[in-house]
Image: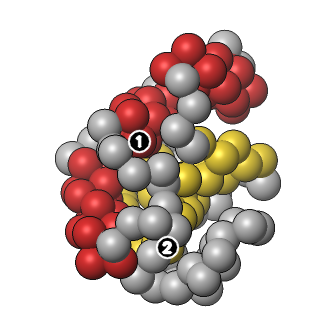
Amino acid sequence: MEGDGSKDVVLVFVADPEADAEIAARQIRRLRAEIAELDVESVRHSPGTSAPDGAKGADTVTSGAILVALGASGGMFTVLVETVRDWLGRQSARHRVSVTIDGDTIELEHPSADERRDLVDTFVRRHTGG
């Protein structure tokens, strides 16, 4: 989506190795649905994206890549990252989601709420000029 001022963000979901594969697949779909409700340009599966390093036995059931196109107006990157962070906080399993924009990646896991907030705030500031 270069040239029109929009940005692509790649989200890679890696399920907790202890989680049931069917439940993990359902949770990926729920995360994608939550993101689709945001004011983003598009949300689609990202083919050919490999799971992050350390992902054991990752496949299309236990991991999923989502490509989110953000509009040029700005502000949605922060909302997107906060949505992923909040979604992770509601999960009982220890899933991971990596968020990549402009070649920079942050991996969100199940840290404490304070740790997660500090990580996200730092990452968002780097990409929003704030």
In the rendered image, residue 123, in percent from the top left (x then y), is placed at 69, 29
Q: Is residue 51 left or right of residue 39?
A: right
**Which secondary structure lies at badge 2?**
strand
The image's mark for residue 63 is 2
Q: Amino acid at mark 2?
A: Ser
Q: Secondary structure at mark 1?
A: helix
Residue tagged 1: 88
Name the residue located 41 percent from the left edge and 42 percent from the top edge: 88
For the residue pair 104 and 110, the one nearer the viewer reads as 110
| Alpha-carbon span between mark 2 and mark 1 | 14 Å
**Residue type marked 1:** Leu
Say which of 83 and 129 sits in front.
83
Total tally of numbered discs in the picture: 2
Q: Is residue 28 visible?
A: yes
Give x and y (percent) for residue 40: 35, 47
Viewer-side residue, 20 vs 51: 20
Residue 91 percent location from the top left of the image: 33, 44
Residue 42 lies, with reference to residue 46, above or below; the image says above
Q: Earlier in the sequence, mark 2 or mark 1?
A: 2
The C terminus, quarter of image: top right
The disc label shown at residue 56, or none: none
- Relative placement, left or right, of 89 versus 111 is left
